[in-house]
Amino acid sequence: MRLFLAGLALLMLAFVVHVVIWRVHPPKRPIHALLGIFAATPLVAVPIFMAIEPSAVIGTSLPDALRVLLFYVPSSLVYVCLYSAIEAQSPSLAIVSYVAGCGSAGCSEADIADHIIDDEGVNARIDSMKASGMIVVGDGRCALTPGGRLWAGLFEFAGKVFRLPLGG
Amino acid sequence: MDGQWTIASAPLAGLALAVLAQIVVVHVSRGKIGASIIIGILGGLAITLAVIALGRAGTRGATDGFVDTWALGVATYLALAFGFWAFLNLNITSMRIRILRELLRAGGHMALSDMAVFYTPAERLRRRLERLEKGGQIKREDGRWLLGSWQVLAIAHCVEALRGFVLPGRGRQPS
């Protein structure tokens, strides 16, 4: 139970720090801040715990420490993934909620289109991709940068290996 | 000690199997993505449990309890499997990734006017409704959309509750 509780305690601590910061002063770049909080929490908490209870940390074997780390890192990333759905409402979840709210009478496609606002259109996405250096835009055309071509190649490769259709 | 390392590596072995199983099933079944992901993730879970059992057998005088051995291993595997699912889902739903792939297929560049046609709001809504219908989350009867299953609705409610807790000023958003 010791290892599981240690992992859970670290996750809870990082979550509490995140909620407190978000309520006091929400960061401008939330995903960066969230990754920073989850990365910093064990780096700060473990030495403090080591100072208070040295035998508990020193007595931990390498495989046990690895197990806690392997639990903590992906669980943190799961929350970071979930956070993007918390921060900006997913249109798919909004559609399901809206359709459920219509009850047994259901709703038409036009009703859904009127109520579901997907304000981040293609232009906003192109702007963000331009800002991150994936594409360049000029003369009414959009072109991949070398970095963008690399990412596009990776996603295309993943699409072929896992047989994923073009999304969007 | 070997058994401890085996137990520690069990979730990674499970993830590796989940990825391989997804690839095999999706190719054998000719593109049944949903089924391939479920089979992959369940197969990975089975491998995780099997490797943990193997590790337990190789650990003489183990002092770990049930929770540290089994629950920690399974929880770690589920977190890794969620990451794998999120990666696949992102490839299916992300418009940015679609733009990158479309640009690559078009030789690396495309007219902005052509792109705007692909990604109109009506086209995006049609794709989303199609995906949700295919996944059984909603269904169409006599031209009207109805709820197909409660699972995604439960997720939507959980996300809304979490949003209300983490971002109190932005609780329920108009849908």
Image (tube, coloured by chain):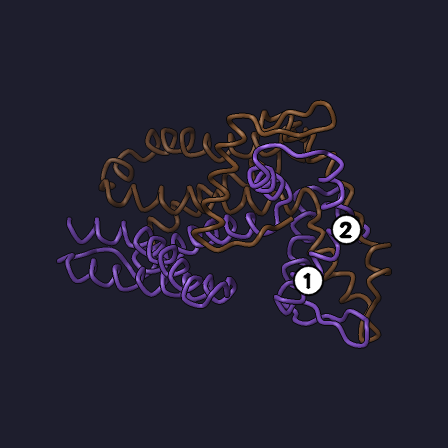
Chain colours: A brown, B purple
Residue drawn at point x = 29 percent, y = 37 percent = A57
Q: Nearer the viewer, residue A17 or A52?
A: A17
Along the line of sight, which residue is nearer the eye, A123 or A105?
A123
- At 56% from the left and 41% from the top, the residue drawn is B105
Residue beneath disc 2: B172
Q: Disc 1 on helix, strand or loop?
A: helix
Report how many numbered discs are placed on residues in the image: 2
| Residue B61 to residue A11: above or below | below
Q: Residue furthest front?
A: B107
x and y percentages locating residue A47 in the rendered image: 36, 29
Question: Relative to A54, does residue A67 appear above or below in the rendering?
Answer: below
Kindly check if marks 1 and 2 are in contact, taking CB atoms under 8 A apart as contact.
no
Secondary structure state at the residue bearing disc 2: loop
Tell which of B98 and B36 is nearer to you.
B98
Is B85 situated left or right of B9 in this image? right
Mark linked to residue B130: 1
Q: Amino acid at mark 1?
A: Glu
Distance, label 1 to label 2, CA atoms, is: 26 Å
Residue B142 placement (x, y as % from top left): 81, 76
Q: Decide which of tag 1 and tag 2 comes sooner along the chain.
A: 1
Tag 2: amino acid: Arg
